[in-house]
Amino acid sequence: MLSIPLSELPADFRARALRWAAGFPYCAYFEPNGLQYPNGPFDHLLGVADEAPDAPGTLEELRSWLTQFATAGPHFGFLSYEVKNEIEDLHSRNVSGLNWAHLHFFRPHTWLRWEADVVEFHGRTENVLAAILATAAPAPAAIQVPALTPRMPKAEYLAAVEAVREDILNGEVYELNLCQEFYAENVSLNPVDVFLRLNEASPAPFAGFVRHHDHFLLCASPERFLSHHAPVIVSQPIKGTIRRGASPAEDERQRATLLHDEKERAENLMIVDLVRNDLARVAQIGTVQVPELFGLYPFRHVWQMISTVTAKLRPGVDIVDILRATFPMGSMTGAPKIRAMQLIEHYERTRRGLYSGSIGYVWPNGNFEFNVVIRSLQYRQDTGYLSFQVGSAITYDSVPELEYEECLLKARAMLEVLGTTVNE
């Protein structure tokens, strides 16, 4: 291991390191942005690999793959939303301009960790520092992205919300997370530059950058899916959103409005109950707890209502058992989960890909951290397909126009970074 004090590195070392890393076909970067978060944010990690010949593509392959080799470092990877089809009798037949791998993990041959006032270099470290320092930043270039096209036109989205409300009235679901895609084609951009701009515009505790060949994820997620520090597992679903105020007084009024909004509290509580039930499938009896309910946390553009659910795992339970019990996260599906996912497939017009999936890392001792992929851009460099998805939780009390406005609020930072709008 090589350890270098941050004071001896250039101020833009992080950006140089990411530009260097993005040159590899397998790259994963996890950025906590120095933010405080209950139970902590992501570790600050970066890893790369030239190849991943034995990479798992399913949950069952992941189970054996994680135990094949003794290693001191983390394993990096992602799960697409479509992993649900491996867990339940479901399918994904909507169109996709992205076509991410179902699931992918890799062992980095070189990985960096920002820890306190130093950067640690692990694995194959020879000449890595020199290569990073020699990586120059390109001249700033304007991002040219056309107005994004909705896969589901606004009128169709509003009609879908009304149809979901009817489903709720008929007892099909209690709540459903309805999402929509906005996309552009033949776009040429620098994924690292766009990620750095997004991260600056909307700093988040579970931000990340992933390259998988020609596929890129630029993620500014505020939400934790699962954290495991033996024997405790933590999930922190977000349900409840309101824009920040333009002044301190207005901001406090917005916070109070969210805190007392019965619809938002009901959304949050339903998902907390779902998460409690999911964790109970792998937890020791009597250990599932909710240490914080309806917590309010400020981000750059929005207030979020976040609850925390914890449990102690039963002996012998591994990561695949946990994922089978909890994935996909309830905050992105609805309740009851299986019926909600069936209706999502019916109403939505595109596959979600990594949106509503997760990126994260697993340590050799079994501890791990995974986020919820939201507030994210997905990009295919080979085709120029650029996409983001946003959604909101539909309950019977939902007002279609307000749900649509919530979607655009969540898209605000991404649209600002791209310098574009959406065609409504």
Image (cartoon, rainbow, N blue to C red):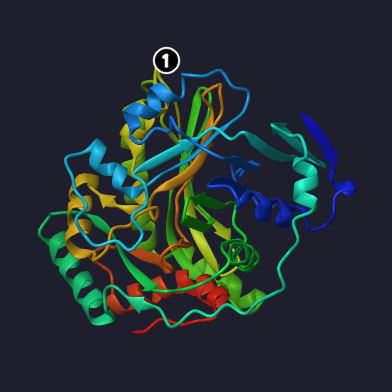
Q: Secondary structure at mark 1?
A: loop
- Determine whether 54 is above or below 117 in the image: above
Is residue 384 toward the left or the right of residue 179 in the image? right
The residue drawn where x is 43% and y is 29% is: 54
Tell me how many marks there are. Answer: 1
Residue at the image position 39 percent from the left and 52 percent from the top: 354
Direction top: furthest residue: 315
On screen, residue 223 above or below 303: above
Report x, y in % for residue 352: 33, 57
Residue drawn at (19%, 54%), measured in percent from left and top? 173
Question: Which of the 4 image quarters holds residue 202?
Answer: bottom right
Report the residue marked by disc 1.
Answer: 315
Give the answer, above or below, for where 195 lies relative to 66.
Answer: below
- Would residue 418 be visible to someone looking at this image? yes
Where residue 8 sits in the image (x, y, percent)?
Answer: 89, 47
Q: For this view, does 10 lie left or right of residue 355?
A: right
Assess disc 1: are there few (<14), some (14-19) or many (≥20) residues with their C-alpha within 10 Å of its C-alpha: few
